[in-house]
Image: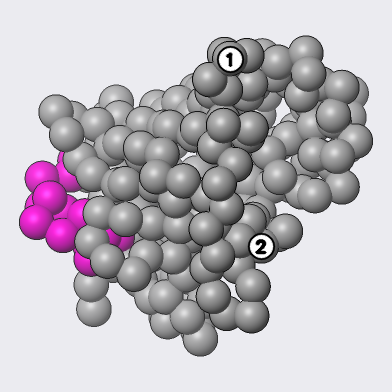
Amino acid sequence: MNTTFATIFAEQWDALPPALKAHYANRPFTRDHVIVEGTLDVEMHPLLRRLSWLIRATGMLTPYEGKAVPVTVHFRSELDSDAFVFERLFRFAGRAPVTFRSRMVSKRPHHVTEYMATGIGWQAHYDYHEGRVRLQHAGYVWRLFGLDMPLPISGLAGRGDAWEEATGDDCFRMYMELRHPWLGKLYSYGGAFRVTEMRLDG
């Protein structure tokens, strides 16, 4: 059975280094579970810091910032779907752990939609280019009654872009940012991870 992301990367899958193939090892319709651990530097625009209560309430992103924040990420498959589930656990110093959960779904090669708990989805073009996985902003949608409704809020919420790059056979670094056309960088996190556990037992 192909991995979920072998279909997404399509003709580029074979070129991915071992660390990124391990990161994306989950198969659809299984109980596959991959764990990566590392640290992230999390930065927030002052405006977003003032809206931390809203971030907490919606479960989107994280309501705090910090340097070298320990993070554990669980990548899970689901028996009844082909979704790729992210469960990110941030341990900010002096605070209760923060969980940020999302589900990534693809309907065609090189394109994904990452759905948040609110039903809002971030769309991205997904590819592998010159040693990096690139996630390039392609707009927002809102999932209503099983349909994706276009949500023209990129000018308000900003555009999200990210990249990932292998640094060894089982480790990688990554960076993600949300950038507003006038306010500049609203939110970002970047750091390094190691694949610490793989349970491909579906």
SS label for mark 2:
loop
- Residue at 66% over, 62% down: 119
In the image shown, does 22 or 191 lie closer to the viewer?
Answer: 191
- Cα distance, mark 1 to mark 2? 26 Å
Which image quadrant: the C terminus? bottom left
Q: Position of residue 65 (x, y in %)?
A: 73, 20
In the image shown, does 115 or 169 lie closer to the viewer?
Answer: 115
User: Which of the 4 image quarters holds residue 112?
Assistant: bottom left
In the image shown, does 199 or 67 lie closer to the viewer?
Answer: 67
Q: Disc 2 marks which amino acid?
A: Gly
Q: Which residue is mark 2?
A: 119
Tell me if 80 is positioned left or right of 102 in this view.
left
- Residue at 60% over, 67% down: 143
Tell me if 89 is positioned left or right of 96 in this view.
left
Q: Position of residue 44 (x, y in %)?
A: 70, 19
Q: Position of residue 181 (x, y in %)?
A: 53, 20
Tell me if 14 is positioned left or right of 202 in this view.
left
SS label for mark 1:
loop
The rendered magenta stretch, by its main secondary structure, is classed as helix
Is residue 76 in the magenta section?
no
Q: Position of residue 6 (x, y in %)?
A: 22, 62
> Magenta stretch?
5-17
Q: Which residue is mark 1?
A: 182
